[in-house]
Image (cartoon, rainbow, N blue to C red):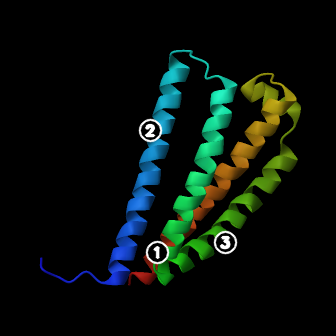
Amino acid sequence: MGEKVTRQGAREALAQRVLVGCGLAGGVTGALWGALSAMEIAVPRPLLVVSAVVAIPALAWAMLIYWRNVDEAAREAHKFAWFWGGSGGLLLALPLMALVTTNRLELVFGPHEPSEWVAGGLIGMVVLQIAGYGLTWAGWWLVRQR
C-alpha cells in the first residue's frame, strides 16, 4: 500500500478521472433528456445553444487533458481503432445507403421531413463509426494481452 506514486501513474490516474467524469456527465445528460422527453417538456432552444456553447469547449479541454496524460499504448489503441474501426463502420454503411430509398424508409419508419431523414442518416453514420471504433479498440487490446 505504501507504493510511491510515479509521475506517469499520477498522470494516468488523472486521465482516468477525466474519462470517468465525462462518462458520468454524458449519462446524467442522457437521463435528464430522456426524463424531460417522457414528461413531454420541451427544452427552450436558447438553453440548448448555451449548453452546447459551454459543453463543447469543456469537452475539448477534457479531451486534451486525457490525451496528454494517457500512456503511449492507449494513444496507439485509439488512433488504430479510430482509423480502422471508424473507417470500417463507414464502409459498412455505404452499401446500405445505395439500397435505401425514400419509399423503403417510409415503409419502415413512416413519413418524415427531409431534415429528419438527414439527421437520422448522420446519427446512423456516427453510430456505425463508434461501433466500429469500439470493436476495433477492444480487439487491439485483446490481441496485446497475450
| Residue under label 3 | 84
Question: Residue visible at 56% across and 72% down?
Answer: 78
Q: Sequence order check: which comes first, mark 1 or mark 3? A: 1
Of tags 3 and 2, the one toward the viewer is 2
- Tag of residue 142: none
Q: Secondary structure at mark 3?
A: helix
Mark 3–mark 2 Cα distance, whole angstroms, equals 30 Å
- Amino acid type at circle 1 is Asn
The vertical placement of 119 against 84, above or below, is: above
Q: Sequence order check: which comes first, mark 2 or mark 1? A: 2
| Residue under label 2 | 28
| Residue under label 1 | 69
Of tags 1 and 3, the one toward the viewer is 1
The answer to which of 10 and 93 lies nearer the viewer is 10
- Amino acid type at circle 2 is Val
The answer to which of 109 and 75 lies nearer the viewer is 75
The vertical placement of 72 against 54, above or below, is: below
Q: Secondary structure at mark 1?
A: helix
Mark 2–mark 1 Cα distance, whole angstroms, equals 25 Å
Q: Are marks 3 and 2 in contact (CB under 8 Å)?
A: no
Residue 41: x and y in percent read 56, 16
Q: What is the quadrant of the C terminus in the image?
A: bottom left
